[in-house]
Amino acid sequence: MTEPSTSPPADRDPDADPDIGTDATSGARLRLRLLFPGSMIGPGKIELLERIRSEGSISAAGRGMKMSYKRAWMLVEEMNAAFRAPLVESARGGPGGGGAQLTETGEAVVRHYRALIAATLSAGAGEIAAIEGLLRGESGGPEDPDMSDGK
């Protein structure tokens, strides 16, 4: 059995599929949401953080995700408030321009989330394959029989 893919590189293509982990053998995608009391972190927020890192801008990151500026800012504020230290630092625009960047804590959150996805895919490869084997059609399971008998 081939090893599942590891997490995408830190500078992943911002136009790539927003799914966070893909099993290399089956193509199954894993979307993991961590629910903590009072907060949540999942693939959308991780993608936003990665886009902020690559774009250097909260508004550009939001636009890249087809998200309003207000929504992107709200999510950043929500994440910054949920963690002991902010995940994103921003500077207001002006003659020198504004911008945003991930803090050390923000980088750590992305890194730990990616490692969790890779570990989950690796540990769950057998279960993913077993579930895939039970699917109908092209994925390897029995074909869906035509019960209409030509009618």
Image (spheres, rainbow, N blue to C red):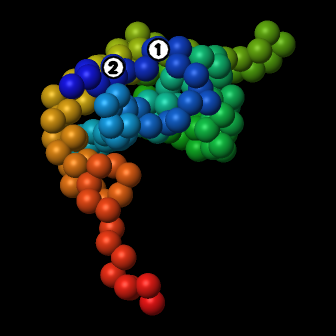
Is residue 117 at all visible to an observer of this figure? no
Secondary structure type for disc 1: loop
Rendered position, 45 above or below 113:
below
Q: Which mark is residue 6?
A: 2
Q: Position of residue 97 (x, y in %)?
A: 77, 15
Q: Position of residue 122 (x, y in %)?
A: 21, 26
> Can you identify the residue that label 1 sits on?
10
Is residue 110 at all visible to an observer of this figure? yes
Front one among 44 and 103? 44
Q: Position of residue 87 (x, y in %)?
A: 44, 21
Q: How far apart are the alpha carbons under marks 2 and 1?
A: 12 Å
Which residue is situated farthest in the right direction here?
Answer: 95
Image position of 134 (left or right of 89) = left
Q: Which mark is residue 114?
A: none
Q: Amino acid at mark 1?
A: Ala
What residue is at 21 percent from the left and 40 percent from the top?
129
What residue is at 60 percent from the left and 17 percent from the top?
54
Quarter that holds the N terminus: top left
Q: Amino acid at mark 2?
A: Thr
Front one among 95 and 27? 27
Which residue is situated farthest in the front direction here?
Answer: 150
Instruction: Single out the mark in the foreground, 2 or 1.
Output: 2
What residue is at 26 percent from the left and 43 percent from the top?
35
Q: Position of residue 121 (x, y in %)?
A: 25, 30
Q: Quadrant of residue 123?
A: top left
Secondary structure type for disc 2: loop
Q: Quadrant of residue 25?
A: top left
